[in-house]
Image (spheres, rainbow, N blue to C red):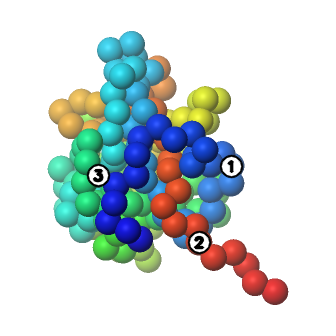
Amino acid sequence: RSGKLPSLGSEDEFFDHKRFGTGSTYGIQIWGGNASDEEALRGWLFANVGGGNPGPGALWLTEEGEIDEISWTLLKQSDGTYAMQTANGTVLTAIDGGAPGAGFRSDTAVDAIGDAERFALIDNGDLTVCIRTSVGTYISLGSGIVAGVSDISRALRFRLQLFELAAGPTG
């Protein structure tokens, strides 16, 4: 991967979320919120120091960052949800499973994926998704980036920009 930060807003580089597979790496762009006061919000979902942070400040919103801090590898789970792997190999965890107002940590080992590490990508029908925790809360703004609300109308919206496509099956 190059160290250059991709530009925001190039629609031809976004993929339909139904095609997200395991092992591909994305930049997750915050593309506003469903609330009117968040419509113009833009930036990247940022893993503090590239992952490995015990939280609660492991997840930030930033306008720029190093490629390893804004890279997320999606690991598809058997139930259709995704674990979100950081550049250092650990995965994102919703603290307290995603309890309202709880933050995130990024120090869970990839072989320890449980319910708190599973996220659903909810299609908004406009090239954006909302990200829902296993307990039904959505990633939103609060005192930072939190699993703050169970009402999708207050959730942040995201676009996933492909950074690196995983190799497909052979043979």
Q: How many marks?
A: 3
* Residue 18 numbered tag: 1
- Quarter placement of the C terminus: bottom right
Q: Residue furthest bottom?
A: 171
The tag earlier along the polypeptide, 1 or 2, is: 1
Residue pointed to by mark 2: 166
The residue nearer to you, when weighing 95 against 85, is 85
| Left or right relative to 50: residue 40 | right
Q: Earlier in the sequence, mark 1 or mark 3?
A: 1
> Is residue 92 placed above or below 42 in the rendered structure?
below
In space, the residues marked 3 and 2 are separated at their CA atoms by 21 Å
Mark 2: amino acid: Ala
Q: Residues within 10 Å of mark 3 (few under 14, many from 20)?
A: many
The residue depicted at 26 percent of the width and 35 percent of the height is 101
Dividing the picture into quarters, in which one does residue 52 lie? bottom left
Q: Residue at x 34, y 60 (%)?
A: 4
* x and y percentages locating residue 10 in the rendered image: 51, 41
Quadrant in which residue 69 is drawn: bottom left
Taking the spot 55% from the left edge, 70% from the top edge, the residue there is 23
Name the one closer to the observer, 97 or 18.
18
Residue type at mark 1 is Lys
**Label 1 crowd (10 A; few <14 / some 14-19 / many >=20):** few
Quadrant location of the N terminus in the rendered image = bottom left
* Kind of residue at badge 3: Phe
- Above or below — where is 93 with respect to 152? below
Question: Compared with residue 111, is residue 7 higher up or lower down, i.e. above or below?
Answer: above
Helix, strand or loop for disc 1: helix
Which residue is at the front of the view, 36 or 150? 36
- Tag 2 secondary structure: loop
In the rendered view, tell whether residue 152 sits above or below residue 130.
Answer: above
